[in-house]
Image: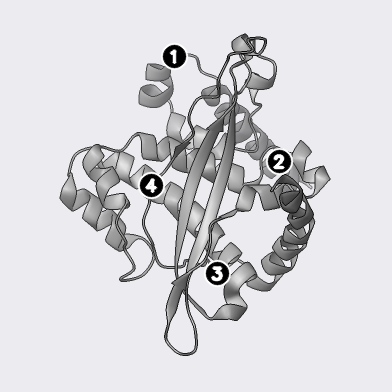
Amino acid sequence: MQITAAVALVLLIVHMFFTAVVNTPNSDIKYNVLPGAAADRYAKPYLVQDYKIFAPDPADTDRQLWVRAWIEDESGAKEATEWINATHIELAATYRKTLRKQLSIVGAERLMGAFSKLSEDHKSVAAENHLDGDALYGLRDAMVAADGSNQAAVDEFIRADNYVTSYATQVAYALWGDSGTIRGVQVRAVYDPVVRWADRKDPNAERPPSRYTDLGWVPPMEWPAQDRDAFARTFRAWAEQAEPQMEATR
């Protein structure tokens, strides 16, 4: 009993400490004195509250993750699938629209944020295909070779790309796994802005242009703890619910 209480107390102290660090207003103190980066990884995305829903200038951009796969059939022919909006499928179940922290949205936010910090040379390399080797080692090495500066930004991008690539791989197996061998996946984080809150009553207001990440093909990626069959059952059920909605908007 005492051991359990002691462990619970330690966990509570760690949680309160990281929560305090996350909310430290001074960024220099937060990241240079305190373990701000570790606190951010601990808290985001599930232990933070998005203040924008209460702010005078609410969030004005839809975040989406798009996915497609490169498939090789039994004859050896390779073909790319069409792009599918994984976020639209993930939100097909009405109850999921209240959560806001769907895997695809979290992935799109992380990927877009990391992509925006890259240099133009890094972005050019990321737009190329990197299908040789395992995981994203080839992509990272090529990015560092093209521009050796700001390797922290490269590593942040690779972590974000790992996340969305492993998610996209599960989507690919769920939707197209029966069509052949998945040789590669491609992801795209899309930011689709709406008219800003301040301009909502202006009849001439126009939506800002969409932004998206321009990334090439990478090898499929799976982690030991992922359950391909369980993911496929769930995602296919969502896709069946999403299909009538997609037909209605065409």
Percent of width and height locating residue 133: 32, 71
Residue where numbered disc 2 is placed: 8
Q: Which mark is residue 224?
A: 3
Residue where numbered disc 4 is placed: 214
The answer to which of marks 3 and 2 sits earlier in the sequence is 2
- Residue 221 placement, left or right of 10: left
Instruction: Say which element carries label 2.
Output: helix
Instruction: Say which element carries label 3.
Output: loop
Q: CA distance from mark 4 to mark 1?
A: 34 Å
* Residue drawn at the location 61% of the way across and 79% of the way down: 178
Percent of width and height locating residue 89: 69, 53
Percent of width and height locating residue 211: 45, 35
Q: Amino acid at mark 1?
A: Asn
Between residue 214 and residue 33, name the one nearer to us. Answer: 214
Q: Amino acid at mark 2?
A: Ala
Whether 122 is drawn above or below 37: the answer is below
Q: Amino acid at mark 4?
A: Asp
Instruction: Say which element carries label 1.
Output: loop
Between residue 244 and residue 168, name the one nearer to us. Answer: 244
The answer to which of marks 4 and 3 sits earlier in the sequence is 4
Picture quadrant of residue 153: top left
* Residue drawn at the location 26% of the way across and 47% of the way down: 124
Between residue 70 and residue 54, name the one nearer to us. Answer: 70
Residue where numbered disc 1 is placed: 26
